[in-house]
Amino acid sequence: MGLDLILRDGQVTLGDACVRADVGVEGEKIAVVARPGSLPGGTQTLDLDGRFVVPGGVDPHVHAATTLGEFTTRDDFEACTRAAAWGGTTTIVDFAIPQPRDGARPLATARERMAAARREAVIDVAFHACLVKGDSASLAEVPQLAREGLTTVKVFTIYRDLVMLGLDEVHACMHEVAAAGGLVLVHAESPHIVEPLRARFAAEGRTDARHHALSRPVEAEVDMVRSVLELFRLTGCPGYFVHVTVPEAVTAIVHARLEGAAVWAETCPQYVFLDDSCYAAEDGELYICSPPIRPRAVADRLWEMVRQGAVQVWGSDHCCYDTAQKFRHRGDFTRAPNGLPGVELRAPLLFSEGVMTGLMSVPRFAALTATNPAKLNGLFPRKGVIAPGADADLAVYDPGWEVTVTAPRLHMATDYTPFEGRRLRGWPRMVFSRGRLLVDGERFDGTAGTGQVLAAGPPIPL
Ligand code: URP
Ligand code: ZN
Ligand code: ZN
């Protein structure tokens, strides 16, 4: 065994356990996990002194360089993947969203996005395909998308005239994706609840940020999750709901799974660690995202469900707009860009609020931030696990490192953070991407184009 690197004496996450061990790396791969001190000398060795070693994060919900309507997110794949790495994430899964106005098709869009990521990315990138029309030509591309490594397909049940599918089209999509051995991701909000509320608030001139949240009530999410669950049951297609915010929606998903459906739930830090008081603030537009951030009591119950394992995936829904974009139509939520920057803080927030408070074990943290997203998105066992043969994507968390979050301290291509001023305990001190040390304390050593574009395989049920 010709090891290139030994990470000595970390608390290493191995499946459900966290044990003191050495990790030996050969080239880009993990070669061995062994008792501390048992690996041969003469190799470059980094002493971890009991710091936590977890699989490099897999963020399954990222929108770099993405246009939705009037706005394009500020980051390219280089900026986005750098920021991700600073926050302990070593793989992102982005989206190939066709621009319906240009008549773009899913496959051509996917190939363009993959080419851009290949040129620009610093860490590895995979893609979800997106169906934004239910026409037969788009549906017919699903098998080829899967052959080219896009086995997961995202659909939106909202954002009419941009990317929305009707439920009949979602049904057809599930049929095709199931046949291709893939998985469907769903943004679930009911247009028949949201659109009339938006229209009424707009007609009454009530377009401040608070009315963004009021126009997208919890009922809109629960209603659509329930309808889409019936389609998952009917078609047998596996899938998960992205950015779930409501405990009742999580409960419906758990029950459907108990009854045999292959369905899971993702949530994001903003839905747990923020609450809707942000919309009453002077800068409320900065927090506009869909679904909206919920009242504290809802967020608290969601957090409990995350800790208890009812939510399986921790994504960021990173949408990197800046203040100028968020304020371009200040006072009119109906014209604001939806989404928050978050790829860099996704994992550190959960580590601080979950692991460092003693509310969450390190293996649960690893499952939410890396293993489960890797499995559901067809990247496991290359990603999301510390085991011989896996890519040497590793994050070393230092429980002694405390960071106060401020926008200038972060690396995302924006000038604000929804988590300004928050004190985080524990931070990824070292981050390795396929054996390369990208982040070493305050130093970064990574260049555009060193990330690979990954071809996802079949999703693995949890
Ligand atoms: O507000 C959000 N979440 N914007 C990003 C697009 C999406 O819905 O995921
Ligand atoms: Zn969404
Ligand atoms: Zn999203």
Image (cartoon, grey):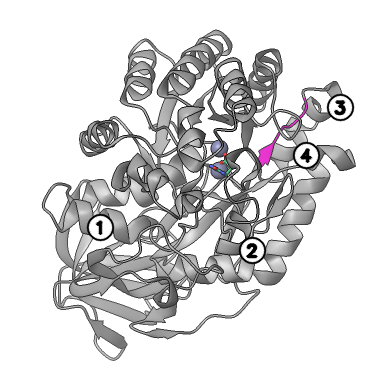
Circle nearer the N terminus (2, 4): 2
Q: Residues within 10 Å of mark 2 (few under 14, many from 20)?
A: many
Q: Amino acid at mark 3?
A: Ala
User: Which element carries disc 1, helix, strand or loop?
Assistant: helix
Question: Would the CB of label 2 be found within 8 Å of ligand 1?
Answer: no
CB at disc 1 and ligand 3 closer than 8 Å = no
Tell me the number on the disc at residue 377.
none
Judging by the rendered image, the residue that carries numbered circle 3 is 137
Q: Which residue is disc 1 drawn over? A: 351
Query: Which badge, 2 or 3, is on the more N-terminal residue?
Result: 2
Of all residues, the one furthest to the bottom in this rendering is: 42
Name the residue rendered at 81%, 27% in the picture. Answer: 140
Pointer 4 and pointer 3: residues touching (CB < 8 Å)?
no
Q: Is residue 131 magenta?
A: yes
* Residue under label 4: 106
Residues packed near mark 3 inside 10 Å, few (<14), some (14 to 19) or many (20 plus): few
Q: Quadrant of residue 131?
A: top right
CA distance for labels 3 and 1:
44 Å
Residue 173 in picture, x, y percent from top left: 68, 22
Disc 1 residue type? Phe
Which dot, 2 or 1, sits closer to the camera?
Answer: 2
Q: Quadrant of residue 306?
A: top left
Q: Position of residue 171 (x, y in %)?
A: 65, 15
Q: Is disc 4 placed on a helix, strand or loop?
A: helix
Magenta residue span:
129-133
Instruction: Inspect this view and state whether residue 15 appears.
Output: no
> For the residues marked 4 and 1, what is the alpha-carbon distance in whole angstroms?
36 Å
Measured as percent of width and height from the top left, residue 251 is found at 32, 19
Answer whether residue 422 is magenta in the image: no
Which residue is tagged 2? 74
Q: Quadrant of ligand 3?
A: top right
| Marked residue nearer the N-terminal end (3 or 1) | 3
